[in-house]
Amino acid sequence: MDLHQTDPEFMERFEYFALEEAVNEEGQQLPDQTRYLAILAALIGCQGVDAFQEILPQALDVGVTAVMAKEIIYQATDYVGYGRMRPFLTIANEIFMTEGVSLPLPGQATSTLENRLEKGIQAQVDIFGEHMKEAWKKGHINRWLAANCFGDYYTRTGLDLAQQEMITFCFLAAQGGCESQLTAHAMGNMNLGNSEEFLIKVISQCLPYIGYPRSLNAIACVYKAAENNP
């Protein structure tokens, strides 16, 4: 259904805000590829299935590769769960087939089932610092976090570590109720060079898709992280 036909007044204002005002706000602009990576991740976080289907082709048009898009979806598994990730994987596969993209895409895994814990611990250290070397020993969930979340996904190629942390920030900001984790990942982003100013730009570009309450909460988490991240 074409909303331009059924809801023309709404679409006029929404598209002006999302595609003109937010995109061109002075001091809040991002490169197209980065902006679409963030928006795609935010749409998964807020369960924007229909919007994701609309926007993924636009993202592909401005340089988000099929591999990048798939990596966003795969990594979302650990932050929204397979049950909420699965529809987005179906949509991406359908769009890729329509666009003539050969599936499966080239493999991006660099860890094995034998070394995923070791590599995951190292990814945690690279993002959060040396204190993470022993965090996996605090219980089986922490071990799973190191081996599965970081060892299975953060060790993949297709996105670099800073991009992976940015999309994690977007998953958490968009779903809400994850403020402690969002603050921690804001700090992780800053450790990787994604500055406070950059994260505010990311939130600004995602705001039309996730709304004001979650965006304001995310900004508060960024400020809190910046206070504790000299």
Image (tube, rainbow, N blue to C red):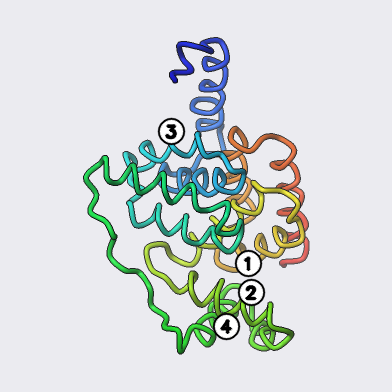
Name the residue type under label 3.
Glu
Q: Name which residue lies at 56% across and 24% down.
A: 17
Considering only order in the chain, which callout, 4 or 1, is on the residue closer to the N terminus? 4
Point out which mark residue 49 bears. none
The residues tagged by marks 3 and 2 sit, at their Cα atoms, a distance apart of 35 Å
In front: label 2 or label 4: 4
Q: Which residue has dot 4 on it?
A: 121
Considering only order in the chain, which callout, 2 or 1, is on the residue closer to the N terminus? 2
Q: Which residue has dot 1 on it?
A: 188
Q: Are marks 1 and 2 in contact (CB under 8 Å)?
A: yes
Considering only order in the chain, which callout, 2 or 3, is on the residue closer to the N terminus? 3
Q: Name which residue lies at 58% across and 64% down.
A: 78
Please, what secondary structure does the residue beneath circle 1 have?
helix
Q: Which residue has dot 2 on it?
A: 128
Point out which mark residue 54 bears. 3
Toward which corner of the image does residue 140 lie, by quadrant?
bottom right
